[in-house]
Image (cartoon, rainbow, N blue to C red):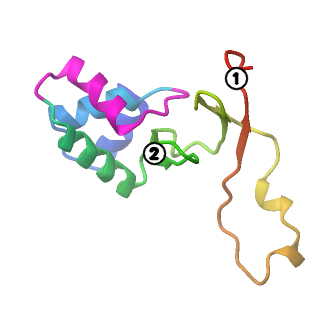
Amino acid sequence: MSDLLERLRGRGWRMTSQRRVVAEVLDGDHVHLTADEVHALAVRRLPEISRATVYNTLGEMVSLGEVAEVSTVGRAKRYDANAHRAHQHLVCSGCGTIRDVHPHGDPLDDLPVEEQFGFTVSDVEVTYRGLCPSCA
């Protein structure tokens, strides 16, 4: 069973065939699919699944905190099932490919106290951009 399916079942989420297929499509390392890509792959496994069901299922998974939305400038939102593994993203400025990266150190430590302006910082999002080997 996939990690995402295990997490969803552990939360008591009712596992319909449609929800299972969406979770299976999203599961894996470096998977950052758009909703339309999830739908296209899900239809191969379950031809009757609707686009609305895929969008609704993705929204529910995001609300549960089991899937993260990844937004990149000028591109459709993508969905990342590795929401429970601390990581950052490396994005190709050419083709939009996204890879998970795990830099050393805590990015929360990189913001000096005088630059926090009294905020209690709880989360950091870092996106590295460049060109993948295919686009370089």
Q: Which residue is mark 1?
A: 132
Residue 56 in percent (x, y) is at 24, 49
**Does 51 sit above or below residue 112?**
above
Q: Residue at x 36, y 29 (%)?
A: 37
Q: Which residues are magenta?
A: 29-48
Q: Can you tell which quarter of the image residue 99 is in?
A: top right
Mark 1 neighbour density, 10 Å: few (under 14) some (14–19) many (20 or more): some
Indicate left or right for 128 with 4 as reference.
right
Q: Nearer the viewer, residue 13 or 76?
A: 76
* Distance between the alpha carbons at the discs numbered 1 and 2: 19 Å
Q: In the structure shown, which secondary structural element does the residue marked by tag 2 occupy?
A: loop
Q: Can residue 96 be seen in this snapshot?
A: yes
Q: Nearer the viewer, residue 10 or 90?
A: 90
Q: Which residue is mark 2?
A: 77
Residue 62 in percent (x, y) is at 39, 52
Q: Nearer the viewer, residue 102 or 11?
A: 102
Mark 2 neighbour density, 10 Å: few (under 14) some (14–19) many (20 or more): some
Q: Residue at x 46, y 38 (%)?
A: 81
Amino acid beneath label 2: Lys
Residue 78 in percent (x, y) is at 46, 41
Q: Quadrant of the C terminus?
A: top right
Q: Nearer the viewer, residue 62 or 15?
A: 62
Residue 26 in percent (x, y) is at 39, 31
**Does 124 sit above or below residue 100?**
below
Q: Earlier in the sequence, mark 1 or mark 2?
A: 2
Q: Residue at x 65, y 42 (%)?
A: 87
Q: Residue at x 70, y 23 (%)?
A: 132
